[in-house]
Amino acid sequence: MKKSKTLRLVVLSLLLVSIISCSKEDDKINVQQNVASFSISKLPEIPEFARSISVDGEERKFILLTEKDEELLFNLSSKKAQYFGKKRVLYGTVTSGGITENAFMYLGENGFYLSFTKDGKPYEIEKNGRLDFGYDYLMKSNIERISSKKSYIMKILKDGYRSKKLVFDENMINKFLNPVFINETKNASEANYLLVDVGLQDHKSIDTYKCQTELLNDQKSLSSECDFFDTKEGRRPKLDFIYIEKNFKKKAITNVIESIAEFTDGEFFIDITSSGPHFLEESMDILENDPEAVDEFVERISDYTNAFAHDSAADDSSDQKIKLNNFYKKYYSDRLGEYVFGALFGKIWNDGIRGLAGGHSWSGCGGSPRYESASFVASDAGLYTVAHEFAHVVGAGHTERSLNDVMIPSRIKTREHKNAINIEIMKKRMDL
């Protein structure tokens, strides 16, 4: 009898502790599901569920509470694809009100980005301020190294340009030596993260080849024009953003990841890297290891600044893309056929174009050697431009304007692919 009474007291004590622990507002424990829950408005900069990924397939299950105390139950698992040198993506589901839909999370250097669908509508949980997606992290270490020897490098460049009789644009070189990593304006809220009902974005684009300018409403004519369904083998591409301008909206990058993941039901996640920071590092290594290698250093920096100067060197988008192709073929020819390569800029070109791609160039359609022009340039005037242009490279064409699809020619409102022909072509070209 005594033992039974003692046992009841122990059980009651444990229940009391459990109830008290569940009363915490910042980091609750859902007793029924045994899942940690967090208030969105009180999230720390890097909450536990957004810690670094250790292994492929790592599972994260957590609840986020809205201001209306609505529960969003996320069930995500990590993907093995690499983004700027690290595993950063988790994909899975979110359940709210008994309805389960898709969810995607990207882990940056100083926080996370989370997008999901609820009741068929897209939502995002965004960092209040600038999220470093990994590119800034790569760039900063190299820029700090270069900046520490700025006067020495500037003298070498001036002398080198003079001896090679090149035009020396000091403003361009200074832009190269002193990129400013801006802090995006924070919302007036003091919260680290904000729940956003995704708005609509505009987009304008043209294509480089005739086979991409037609609407995809006649499969037979397109097949004869571009041999879309030929017997050439598919190949899974990686994506190299050789250059990303400092004020480019990084969320446009996650849209290309999500766009592909959605039409493959979360089965394919493209690897993303950036050769740019490594190119700068290699250039410094050349100079420091051999002070006599001035000519090579000057040539590399000249090629880099001329290829990615937005205002003076490239008056229109086609010039910009030609310069990108020439730079990549000169320095990264061994990557052709493994990477689609792109350059991202913060504003549109003088010709008014927001994005330009080597249409269907991953398969060699349009008269270019296969893979050699598998590239695109894009501005962030529209958040879906990068997803749109990448899709052109791997075979997608424009769709009818009446279709709410990422491949309509202008005023794009979604990252989703809904055209069955486009999806079939892209899957074949990417061997999915």
Image (tube, helix red, strand yellow):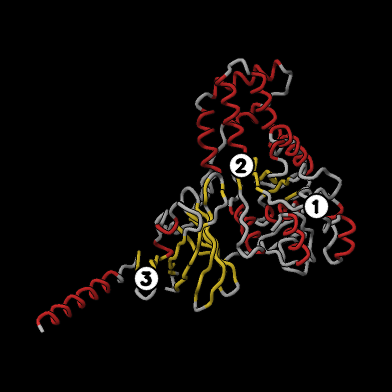
Total number of numbered discs in the rendering: 3
In-front residue for pair 194/252: 252
Could you give the CA–CA distance between mark 2 and mark 3, rounded to whole angstroms?
40 Å
* Contact (Cβ within 8 Å) of mark 1 with mark 3: no
- Number of residues whose C-alpha sits closer than 10 Å to that of mark 3, classed few (under 14), some (14–19) or many (20 or more): few
- Number of residues whose C-alpha sits closer than 10 Å to that of mark 1, classed few (under 14), some (14–19) or many (20 or more): few
Q: Is residue 320 above or below residue 236?
A: above
In-front residue for pair 120/80: 80
- Number of residues whose C-alpha sits closer than 10 Å to that of mark 2, classed few (under 14), some (14–19) or many (20 or more): many
User: Looking at the picture, how far across and down is residue 283, in whole percent?
Assistant: 60, 27
Lower sequence index among marks 2 and 3: 3
Residue indicated by mark 2? 274
Q: Is residue 317 visible?
A: no
Q: Amino acid at mark 1?
A: Lys
Residue indicated by mark 3? 34
Q: Is residue 118 above or below residue 252?
A: below
Could you give the CA–CA distance between mark 1 and mark 3, rounded to whole angstroms?
51 Å
x 70%, y 64%: residue: 417
Lower sequence index among marks 1 and 3: 3
User: Quick check: 270 left or right of 73?
Assistant: right
Image quadrant in which you'd find residue 21:
bottom left
Residue indicated by mark 1? 232
Q: Residue furthest left?
A: 2
User: Looking at the picture, how far across and down is residue 212, in whole percent?
Assistant: 82, 55
Helix, strand or loop under label 1:
loop
Helix, strand or loop under label 2:
loop
> Where, quadrant-wise, is the C terminus in this rendering?
bottom right
Could you give the CA–CA distance between mark 1 and mark 2, rounded to whole angstroms?
28 Å
